[in-house]
Image: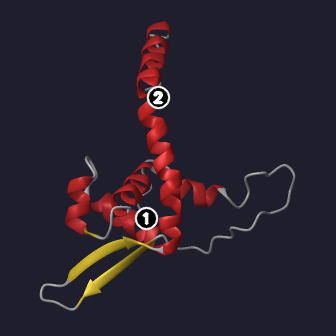
Amino acid sequence: MSPTHTEVTTGAADLDPCGRADHPDCGIRDVLDRVGDKWSVLVVVELASGPRRFRQLQRAIDGISQRMLTLTVRRLERDGLVLRTVYPTVPAQVDYRLTETGTSLTHLVKALADWSLAHRDIIAQARRAYDNGHPDHEIR
């Protein structure tokens, strides 16, 4: 997904592998793009603790805008990872929770988060060394 992409994808996605030897990632890229997105990961991490209302999610996920959170939960809902429940109150209350499929993802996301924490200092050091060795590059 491009950094400027803001629309919810609605076209039919064929997730079956195409079977071509030169396309080993065919059929999984779409799913990995979604569950590997930084905002999706953070929403799944937050919902792993239980149902949350929209504002609770927004407060818990530092730096996410209202628009990006809306798009993220809609995409996760469309993919069957998040369930959105609207309660018939005035004003209407809405909460989000992981589906069974979303819950099955939490151990993988936790492993990734644990790995990130364990290696963040090493990665930061490698970035500084790279940046010092390549002062004219634009990679950040």
Helix, strand or loop at label 2? It is helix
What amino acid is at disc 2?
A: His
Residue indicated by mark 1? 7
Name the foreground residue: 35 vs 114: 114
Q: Quadrant of residue 20?
A: bottom right
Q: Position of residue 4 (x, y in %)?
A: 42, 51
Q: Quadrant of residue 48?
A: bottom left
Left or right: residue 45 compared with residue 101? left
First-in-chain label (1 vs 2)? 1
Q: Quadrant of residue 82?
A: bottom left
Residue indicated by mark 2? 119
Q: Position of residue 76 (x, y in %)?
A: 45, 67
Calculate the distance from the C-alpha at mark 1 to the C-alpha at mark 2.
33 Å
Left or right: residue 18 compared with residue 59? right
**Residue at the location (43% across, 49% down)?**
38
Q: Position of residue 80 (x, y in %)?
A: 50, 74
Left or right: residue 24 compared with residue 6? right
